[in-house]
Image: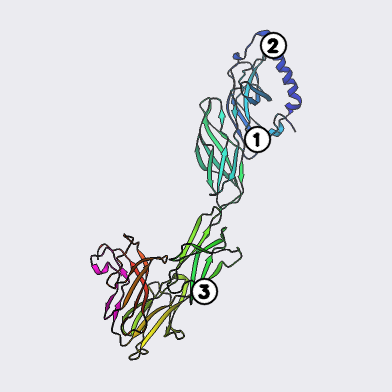
């Protein structure tokens, strides 16, 4: 139903306006005789889309009524249509909905509404204050991409004689209003972060001082968004690398509760970097476990690093996990004894098992150990199997049993033991490039009664060769291309061929730690 003035008052107002023009012509009255009303503010109720206009009364006497006008033209000549007449002359606030007024073919949340308030005297003259209008605000919201955010935009609040101090973005949720951002008077957009809520409602509030010096506010229509923030993975891991002969099985475990479930598995070697092995997607109903068999991953040099990567909706890498096959270290400190050590994989492991093979015979289990956060190692005494005038070629592998049921094996690490070779080959497990002791600054073995063709190779954690030497007395000084290497673990391989009384090459694999201690 339209306002009563549409059906009854409008013809009367039109006739009255014509009569007023005639009377003013006869009496020679002018609009300058009428003091205009002053608009305090216009606003939109964001919950109901009702339009609110508030004004101060005219200071002129004998004011019969005030008229609210919809300004539809603001170019050279301001044009307006009267929408309602309010009897009397008082400070007033008037509320209406656009669907009750015939002049409006749109809702208050579709486009800004410009209003003026004019005062009319008893003799028919008016204040002609159409240029002293105020205009409501319209707010809108949309979701941006890369990154995904909420973009709130709004039309500026404009009004005669006022200057906006600030804009505030208000979020309305279950009857609670929260200021989520404050913006300057010259800002008309802002970005907000998505959160875990699917449906969110916002409106804009302008704060200003009106033409009478009183602080006022105006609110916009409500705008909505219906998208919540993406759920990012809580975990992503290469749980295990299972080495069998020259093949490696990569065992991945992923968070399928995430919104990002497409994964990329890369491999890096000293010959090639970032080779994409596969792309796979896991459903939200899956266990999150995925295995990839890398056939013939390496032949002799374990210089391979795997990367598991997940991308977000903007194709940004949000998770990168790296893993490298473990190689047990062998510390050869006696003719019939050696210590085997290996990496600790943390709380996810329940047991470690150490397997040994001699002269390429089938492996046998020689030790089972529970996870120990303080370090892992085993002293293998072979005095009962190393016969006089014999040489043994001994290889070790470590089996890791994870709490999830996954099992993996490390690469083999081998050593030659003989009861008639008196050579000594002692290999340090750490260097300090800043040490005051010279022998602690360089990685090279200590040896005795040993000769032959010698090669030392040092690799970084990506499997890239960073140092090589063919002189047993020339070691690695802990630098890479003239710069001190970062602290961490580096792999090495030592090969000595044509050694006297050695039927097979002497091969040592292991790790050396680069540490920095300024004083020792």
Distance of label 2 from label 1 (alpha carbons): 37 Å
Q: Is residue 85 visible?
A: no
Residue designated by label 2:
23
Query: Residue drawn 71% across and 34% down?
Result: 99
- Say which label, 3 or 1, has the lower sequence index: 1
Q: Which residues are magenta?
A: 423-451
Q: How many residues crowd around disc 1 within 10 Å: few (fewer than 14), some, or many (20 or more)? A: many
Depth check, front residue: 106 or 206: 106
Q: Is 308 located above or below residue 143 in the figure?
A: below
Q: How many residues crowd around disc 2 within 10 Å: few (fewer than 14), some, or many (20 or more)? A: some
Residue designated by label 3:
406
Residue designated by label 1:
108
Image coordinates for residue 146, horizontal then vertical, percent:
54, 49
Quarter occupied by residue 471: bottom left
Quarter occupied by residue 18: top right
Image coordinates for residue 214, horizontal then vertical, percent:
52, 28
Q: Is 373 located above or below residue 173 in the figure?
A: below
Q: Are marks 3 and 1 in contact (CB under 8 Å)?
A: no
Classify the position of the N terminus by image quarter. Answer: top right
Q: Which secondary structure, mark 3?
A: loop
Left/right placement of residue 10 relative to residue 359 reads right
Farthest bottom residue in view:
388
Query: Residue drawn 28% across and 68% down?
Result: 442
Image coordinates for residue 271, horizontal then vertical, percent:
44, 65
């Amino acid at each position: 139903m339209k306002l009563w003035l549409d059906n009854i008052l409008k013809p009367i107002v039109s006739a009255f306006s014509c009569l007023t023009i005639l009377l003013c012509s006869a009496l020679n009255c002018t609009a300058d005789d009428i003091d205009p009303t002053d608009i305090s503010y216009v606003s939109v109720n964001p919950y109901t889309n009702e339009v609110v206009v508030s004004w101060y009364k005219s200071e002129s006497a004998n004011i019969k009524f005030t008229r609210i006008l919809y300004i539809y033209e603001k170019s050279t000549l301001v044009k307006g249509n009267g929408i309602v007449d309010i009897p009397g002359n008082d400070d007033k606030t008037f509320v209406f909905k656009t669907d009750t007024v015939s002049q409006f073919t749109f809702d208050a949340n579709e486009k800004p509404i410009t209003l003026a308030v004019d005062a009319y005297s008893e003799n028919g003259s008016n204040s002609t204050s159409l240029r002293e209008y105020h205009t409501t605000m319209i707010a809108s919201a949309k979701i941006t991409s890369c990154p995904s955010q909420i973009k709130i935009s709004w039309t500026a609040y404009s009004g005669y004689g006022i200057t906006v101090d600030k804009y505030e973005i208000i979020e309305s949720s279950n009857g609670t209003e929260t200021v989520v951002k404050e913006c300057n008077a010259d800002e008309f957009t802002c970005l907000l972060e998505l959160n875990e809520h699917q449906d969110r409602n916002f409106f804009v509030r302008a704060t200003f001082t009106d033409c009478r010096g009183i602080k006022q506010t105006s609110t916009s229509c409500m705008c909505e968004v219906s998208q919540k923030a993406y759920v990012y993975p809580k975990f992503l891991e290469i749980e295990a690398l299972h080495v069998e002969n020259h093949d490696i099985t990569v065992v991945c475990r992923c968070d399928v509760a995430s919104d990002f479930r497409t994964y990329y598995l890369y491999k890096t070697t000293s010959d090639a970097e970032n080779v994409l092995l596969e792309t796979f997607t896991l459903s939200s109903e899956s266990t999150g476990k995925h295995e990839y068999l890398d056939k013939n991953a390496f032949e002799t040099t374990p210089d391979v690093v795997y990367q598991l990567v997940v991308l977000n909706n903007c194709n940004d890498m949000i998770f990168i996990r790296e893993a490298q096959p473990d190689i047990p270290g062998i510390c050869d400190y006696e003719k019939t004894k050696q210590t085997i050590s290996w990496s600790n994989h943390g709380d996810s492991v329940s047991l470690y098992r150490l397997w040994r093979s001699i002269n390429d015979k089938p492996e046998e289990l020689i030790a089972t150990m529970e996870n120990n956060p303080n370090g892992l190692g085993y002293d293998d005494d072979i005095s009962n199997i190393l016969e006089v005038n014999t040489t043994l070629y001994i290889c070790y592998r470590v089996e890791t049993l994870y709490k999830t049921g996954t099992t993996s094996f490390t690469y083999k690490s081998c050593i030659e033991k003989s009861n008639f070779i008196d050579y000594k080959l002692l290999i340090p497990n750490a260097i300090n490039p800043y040490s005051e002791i010279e022998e602690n600054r360089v990685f090279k073995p200590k040896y005795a009664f040993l000769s032959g063709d010698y090669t030392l190779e040092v690799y970084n954690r990506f499997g890239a060769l960073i140092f090589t030497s063919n002189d047993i007395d020339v070691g690695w000084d802990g630098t890479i291309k003239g710069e001190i290497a970062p602290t961490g673990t580096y792999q090495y391989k030592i090969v000595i061929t044509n050694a006297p009384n050695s039927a097979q090459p002497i091969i040592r694999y292991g790790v050396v730690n680069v540490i920095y201690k300024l004083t020792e």
